[in-house]
Image (cartoon, rainbow, N blue to C red):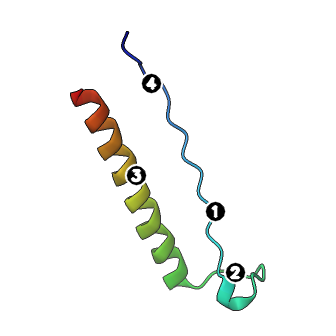
Amino acid sequence: MPVIIDEVIISVEVSNQASGGAASAPAPSASDDKQVIIAECVERVLDILRQKKER
């Protein structure tokens, strides 16, 4: 019986522990770092879905 995934929800929380986790406006480079992390997560999820589809 095949499993069909209609929706995938990805939730990621990124915090900067080096700064003590203070809630301040992120620097522009922090935004770029978040985009890199999100892109890596999406790529991994897509790889997993491709592997499951091949089975």
Lower sequence index among marks 2 and 3:
2
- Above or below, 19 against 47 in this view is below
Lower sequence index among marks 4 and 3:
4
Q: Amino acid at mark 3?
A: Val
Lower sequence index among marks 2 and 4:
4
Discs 2/4, front: 4
| Quarter of the N terminus within the rendering | top left
Q: CA distance from mark 1 to mark 3?
A: 14 Å
| Label 2 sits on residue | 25
Q: CA distance from mark 2 to mark 4?
A: 36 Å
* Residue toward you, 1 or 10: 1
The image shows residue 11 at horizontal and vertical percentages of 59, 51
- Above or below, 14 against 50 in this view is below
Neighbour class for label 3 at 10 Å: few (<14), some, many (≥20)?
Answer: few
Q: Which mark is drawn over residue 13? A: 1
Q: Residue furthest left?
A: 54
Q: Amino acid at mark 4?
A: Ile
| Label 3 sits on residue | 42
Q: Secondary structure at mark 1?
A: loop
Q: Secondary structure at mark 2?
A: loop
Q: CA distance from mark 2 to mark 3?
A: 25 Å
Q: Secondary structure at mark 3?
A: helix
Neighbour class for label 4 at 10 Å: few (<14), some, many (≥20)?
Answer: few
The image shows residue 55 at horizontal and vertical percentages of 24, 26
| Label 4 sits on residue | 5
Q: Amino acid at mark 1?
A: Glu
Residue at figure coordinates x 36%, y 14% from the top left? 2
